[in-house]
Each structure stands twice: as structure tokens, then as C-alpha cells.
Amino acid sequence: MNGPSVLTPQAQSNAVSPWPVFWIASVAVFLVSIDVTVLYAAFPALRLAFPDAHPASLSWVLNAYTLVFAALLVPAGRLADLRGRKRTFLLGLAMFLAGSLGCGIATRVEMLWAMRAVQGAGAALLLPASLSILLAAFPVNKRAIAVSLWGAVSGVAGALGPSLGSFLVDRFGWPSAFFLNLPLGAIALWRGWRILDESRDPERGAPLDLVGVVLLILGVGAIAFGLVQSEAVGWTSPVVALAIAGGLVMLAAFVAWARTARAPAIDLSLFQDRTYCYINLASLCFAIGFAMMFFQTFLFTTGVWSYSLTRAGLAGSPGPLLVVPTAIVCGRFAARAGHRLLLVTGSLISTAASVWFALVPGVTPDYVHTWLPGALLTGLGVGMVMPALSAAAVAHLPPARFGVGSAVNQAIRQMGSVFGVALTVAITGNAIGHLAEFRTLCYLQIALGLATAILCAPVDTRPRALAPATAH
């Protein structure tokens, strides 16, 4: 096995097939991506398994993972550059698997919170390292297709998650949503230890910004806590006001810290670019609405229509299945004409889907006529917007900042998911069989979709507009 090396286009990748490395990296991103959507499917089963737990408490089974993942994503990438990509990848994968096992055997909600946080930390360590390992394994002329396929794996995982997760949870119970990760993950861990080469880039690396990570987790977490508690104690409760105010203070402290830190958890200098600001605000809005939409699909079909989990998972699959082909077609269009038209149109299509869900589905199940059209509109809109947001986020940045710019955008999306879950729980609470609460969710999604479209309107990533922006 080769010793550590600085990341360069590897000469041996022309002689040795890089596809085993691709398999290992893809398994990792598959597990991380499917884990989120599987947990949306498992949430109704968790409510039955822990009947004494309030929905606000159970929401942290989802949000503990997302919150830690978002806060660690950027500094974990820098840590991998400093300490070694292989070492960081294997450590992250081992933590992710240990967290999955711990979740599956948990007997208390508090243990689920802790193990989900371990999973989130592991995911943050392995995800950026897996991309760096992939880039190192492939020659320059094949990297674009490798990265595209690696990204497509994430889309496939998201599409499979609802139906696969629902089937497993329905047949084998909620722990199967976590045990699902263990066989493939263990094989990837063993193969990665055997065949991956170590690489690092000390000039780009930096120690973990623990202060920034803690402030970010406390800030976003406190606001999410205030939102979920509002359903139980009311919006006028001092607990809610103090939690949200405390979260805002923590986020302000994070901004102050990030301005002086050598390698902050989120590099605020990126936001000097106006397009980057617009795109990240749009990403936050869209991620909040997307999490609410995904969550409400399972709560509505199981709560209002009394579907089994397996049937609910199948009901939620057409939209995600439409995302990948839509993204492929739209990606070709964006390469020629930029992302603005896709972003604005896709946001409006997603908004139209929310209007449909607010007005059409009733208490009587009628999937084909009242749910499927909205689900297909959602898949079309998400397929147009999500990949375009990722690409537009870095379009105006110089190449040297593509990595950190993309990671910050991903972290902001994850924070949006935290708020989306919190708002869903705050609005629905224990009223899982009531139609009015779900329509309120749809109205919020309409507002978020319109906000996304408005924020994307000034974005110009056409090739001729990018030339001066990326020249430096």
C-alpha cells in the first residue's frame, strides 16, 4: 500500500482501474443519501414505538443528524486535506456505521438522538473525503463523468429511499431503517482499508474550527428547538421566545467569530459575491420547503388516508424517480443558457404543486386523481431546481474556491432541512389525521417557493456573464 502523498493527478490511474475506488466512494454517498429519506418513512413507526415521546422530541431523531452534518461539513473537508483523505473517509464511515448500529438497538429516544448525532458527524467526515478520493483516482479527462455518476448515485438513493425504507420498516420494524446501512457499509470499509491510497494537501488543510462548529450547532439548534416546542407550549411561551432569541444571539456570535477565525466553519468572505448570496438564500428557502414536502407525504398518506407504510412509500416514489432524468436534461440546457430560467421556472412549478396539494386532496383516498399529479409536478420542479442551485452556487467563484463554496451551500441546505422538519412538527404536532394542518404546511411551501423564484430572478450564470467573474 502506498504512503501518504500530496493530491496530484495520479499517474497510476491510467494503468490501474479507478472503478473499485468509485464503487467505495459511491457506496458511501449512497448510504448517506438514503439515510435521510428512509428516516422520513420511519417517522410514523417511531411515533408508534415511542408513544410516550412528544413529536417535538422525536423530531430530533431527524434533526440531530442533519444539524451536526451541516455544522461539520466544511471543516471536515479541510481536516481531510490536513490529516489525510483515506484516514478521514474510513473514520467517517466507521462512525456512520457505529451510529447506525447504535440507533438500531436504541431503547430510549435520548439514545437515538445521540447515535444520530454520531451518524451525522460520520457523514460529514466521509462525504467530502469521498469526493477528493474519487478525484485522485481518475485521470483528468475522466473526472467529469466520474463526478457526474457519483452525484447520480445520490439521486438514485433519494428516489429509492421512500419505497425501500417504508417496505423494510413495515416488514421488520423501525430498527431496519438503520440496520440497512450495515452490510454495504462494512464491505466498503473493508475494501477501502485494503485498496485506497492516502493523500493529503497540507496547504489547503486546517484544524477543526470547534468554536465555530459549536456556535453554529447551538444557534440553529436553539431556533429549531423553539419552533418544535411552540406546538406544545404556544408561540407566546417564554420558552419559545428565549430559545429563538438565544439561537439568534449564538448565530450572531458565530458571525463575529467567523470574521476573525483563520479557517472558520463557514467562510463568510464567499458572501461578498451577490450571486452567491442570492443562491444560498434561495437554497435555504427551497430546502425548508423540500423537507416539509417530503415529511408531509408520509404523515398525510399514513395519517389522513390510513395507508400502510409500504403503500405510503410507493405513493411517495414517482416524484423522486422523476428528479434524476429531469436533472440530466436540464443540465444540458444550463450549460448553454445558464441557470436562471431553470431556477425560476422550477420554483414556480414546485409552487404550483403546493397549490395543488393545498386545494385538491381530501380525506377520501384518491391517489391517481388527487395526489399523483402534484407528486409529478414536485419531481419536475425539484429536478430543475436542486442541481441548478448547486451549479449556480459556484458559477461566479474562482476555481480554487469551488470546493468550499459548494460545501457551504450544502451546509446551508442541511440547515434548511432542520427548519423544515421543525416547522412541520410545530404545525402538525399530534394532529396527524387532520386535513387543516397539512393545508397550512402547503401554504407555507407556496410562500417558500415564490421566495425561491424571486431570489433566483437576478441570478445570471450564462457563459458570457461568467467570463469576467471567474477570470480572477
Image (cartoon, rainbow, N blue to C red):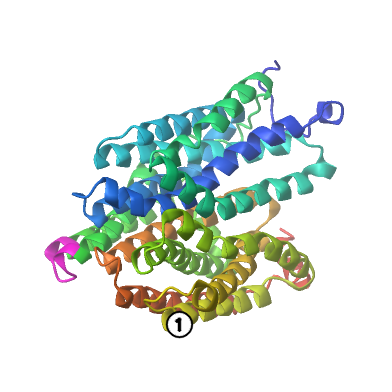
Relative image position of residue 384 (x, y in whole percent): 64, 69
The amino acid type found where label 1 is placed reads Val
Is residue 36 visible to the viewer in this orientation of the structure? yes
Query: Could you tell whether 39 is left or right of 372 in the image?
Result: left
Q: Is residue 402 above or below residue 196?
A: below
Q: Is residue 166 magenta?
A: no
- Residue under the image location 31 percent in, 53 percent down: 59
Query: Could you tell whether 468 is left or right of 297 in the image?
Result: right
Relative image position of residue 77 (x, y in whole percent): 55, 40
Q: Nearer the viewer, residue 466 or 425?
A: 425
Q: Kindly indicate the quadrant of the structure image that contains residue 360.
A: bottom left
Which residue in the protein does label 1 denote?
360
Is residue 263 visible to the viewer in this orientation of the structure? no
Element assignment for label 1: loop
Q: Nearer the viewer, residue 433 or 182?
A: 433
- Residue under the image location 42 percent in, 80 percent down: 358
| Stretch of the chain drawn in magenta | 232-240
Locate the N terminus by quadrant.
top right
